[in-house]
Image: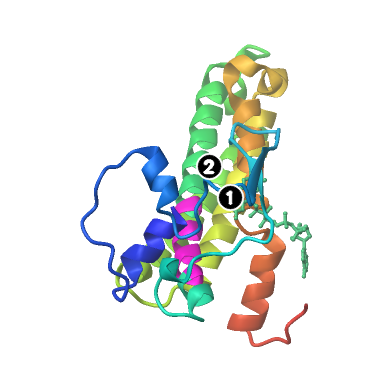
Amino acid sequence: MALFNLIRRNADITVGRVKIQKYSDFTRNLPVPANINLISIKPLRAMLNHATTEVFFDDLRVPAKNLIGEEGKGFRYLLDGLNAERILISAEAIGDARWFIEKASAYAGERRVFDRPIGQNQGIQFPIARAYAATEAADLMVQKAIGLFDQGEACGSEANMAKLLSADASWAAADMCLQTHGGFGFAEEYDVERKFRETRLYQVAPISTNLILSYIAEHVLGLPRSF
Ligand SMILES: Cc1cc2nc3c(=O)[nH]c(=O)nc-3n(C[C@H](O)[C@H](O)[C@H](O)COP(=O)(O)OP(=O)(O)OC[C@H]3O[C@@H](n4cnc5c(N)ncnc54)[C@H](O)[C@@H]3O)c2cc1C
């Protein structure tokens, strides 16, 4: 995904017409060939349904003809792709948060305890309403980052803030949703526990919350670099 974002944003890289090709041809033609034994890929069993792997590169040499763009500018190209990735993940986190809010609202309306729906209690309503407000606020930053990116403008701060706010909103919504479901929040059939595990990822990947705060402190607020 990052590779394709990188290609789309850099006019000095010619990629020609998009074509469909066999997977074996695709891997053979990658800038870093994936079908040679200097790269090893080890599946990593994890708490969520990503096909997660560790990738090891040992003494790998890449042919000069495989260079993308200009020598020495690789990290800059990569950073551009990382902003796109952060914005995409932010939108995903917003989707998760909205799923939790809808799921919690529906359950709070139908589950009856002491002859009334639990959603009639402010103790249940308020966390759902708070999660909704936080999610919509985070989405405003996501939309701002998307707008800047689409216009080719610098969007590092906005992409990072969108990722921070949406990850926090989805995690808070997940916690609220599980609590609203009581014991059934832990039952597989409601999907809440699965999504709860999945949305926790955004506090860590593709960039951890601390590293975003550190970026804002240093690059937006001008504070000394902390590492
Ligand atoms: C399911 C999954 C899928 C992933 N997919 C990809 C992928 O497709 N591509 C890819 O490249 N990576 C991927 N990752 C890796 C992911 O991007 C990293 O795990 C993430 O960026 C955190 O890096 P780390 O694990 O090295 O943590 P570390 O850097 O070891 O950090 C550990 C903890 O210390 C904190 N920390 C570190 N340094 C500082 C500091 N200076 N100040 C304050 N706190 C600090 C971090 O915030 C974190 O909480 C994936 C990870 C997971 C779990």
Task: Say what amino acid the circle numbered 2 marks.
Answer: Ala
Residue 121, x across and y down, in percent: 63, 29
Instruction: Determine whether the residue tagged by mark 1 lies in a helix, strand or loop.
Output: helix
**Quadrant location, ligand no. 1:** bottom right
| Residue numbers of the magenta segment | 78-89
Q: Is residue 220 left or right of residue 71?
A: right
Most common SS among magenta residues: helix
Q: Residue at point 69% right, 30% down? A: 179
- Residue that carries the numbered disc 2 in the rendered image: 97
Q: Is residue 201 above or below residue 117?
A: below
Task: Say what amino acid the circle numbered 1 marks.
Answer: Ala
- 112 vs 219, nearest the viewer: 219
Q: Are marks 2 and 1 in contact (CB under 8 Å)?
A: yes
Q: Which mark is residue 101?
A: none
Q: Residue at point 57% right, 39% down? A: 128
Q: Which mark is residue 169?
A: 1
Residue 188, x across and y down, in percent: 64, 17
Q: Residue at point 43% right, 66% down? A: 66
Residue 101, x across and y down, in percent: 52, 36
The answer to which of marks 2 and 1 sits earlier in the sequence is: 2
Q: Is residue 26 left or right of residue 224?
A: left
